[in-house]
Image (cartoon, rainbow, N blue to C red):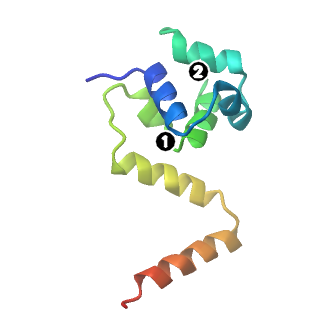
């Protein structure tokens, strides 16, 4: 079943417990802009705005734009790796150390 951008935005925002104000603050958008995205069918966000919103919602822009996409493992992993790649080298190493520790046989 096709799920439009506006429904995905609202669903994920509410799942994370964000108000429109909070999502606006975290994504650098205005509350009114986000309201329009969630409530008007013809609204098309800019790539820059949509990328910031997707990051806050822990999804990808591709997932948000594809009305036939489900939030499957591919999109979840892609969103994680995008966040991971923005970390500094020290934080990346700490995460790698945790993964190595968890992967050791008990």
Q: Nearer the viewer, residue 21 or 59?
A: 21
Which residue is drawn at the image coordinates 52% and 32% (left, top)? 14
Q: Identify whether 65 is placed above or below 16.
A: above
Q: Residues within 10 Å of mark 2 (few under 14, many from 20)?
A: some
Say whether residue 69 is left or right of residue 60. Answer: left
CA distance separating discs 2 and 1: 16 Å
Which secondary structure, mark 2?
A: loop
Do the CB atoms of the residues marked 2 and 1 lie less than 8 Å apart?
no
Q: Which residue is mark 1?
A: 59
Q: Identify whether 11 is placed above or below 99.
A: above
Which quadrant holds the C terminus?
A: bottom left
Q: Identify whether 36 is placed above or below 77.
A: above
- Sequence-first disc among 2 and 1: 2
Q: Residues within 10 Å of mark 1 (few under 14, many from 20)?
A: many
Q: Nearer the viewer, residue 60 or 12?
A: 12
Which label is found at residue 31?
none
On the image, the x and y values in percent for residue 70 come to: 32, 36
Which secondary structure, mark 1?
A: loop
On the image, the x and y values in percent for residue 64 come to: 45, 31
Q: Which quadrant of the figure has residue 37?
A: top right
Which residue is drawn at the image coordinates 69% and 33% (left, top)? 22
Which residue is drawn at the image coordinates 66% and 61% (left, top)? 87
Say whether residue 18 is left or right of residue 78. Answer: right
On the image, the x and y values in percent for residue 57 come to: 55, 39
Which residue is drawn at the image coordinates 53% and 18% (left, top)? 38
Which quadrant holds the N terminus?
A: top left
Which residue is most to the front?
17
Q: Nearer the viewer, residue 35 or 59?
A: 35
Q: Which residue is mark 2?
A: 45
Q: Which quadrant of the figure has residue 88?
A: bottom right
């Amino acid at each position: 079943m096709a799920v439009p951008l506006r429904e995905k935005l609202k669903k994920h925002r509410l799942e994370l417990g964000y108000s429109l104000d909070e999502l606006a603050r975290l994504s650098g958008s205005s509350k009114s802009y986000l309201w329009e995205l969630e409530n008007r069918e013809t609204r098309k966000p800019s790539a820059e705005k949509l990328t910031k919103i997707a990051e806050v919602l822990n999804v990808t822009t591709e997932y948000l734009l594809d009305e036939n996409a489900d939030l499957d493992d591919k999109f979840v992993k892609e969103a994680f790796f995008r966040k991971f790649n923005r970390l500094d080298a020290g934080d990346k190493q700490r995460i790698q150390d945790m993964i190595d520790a968890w992967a050791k046989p008990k």
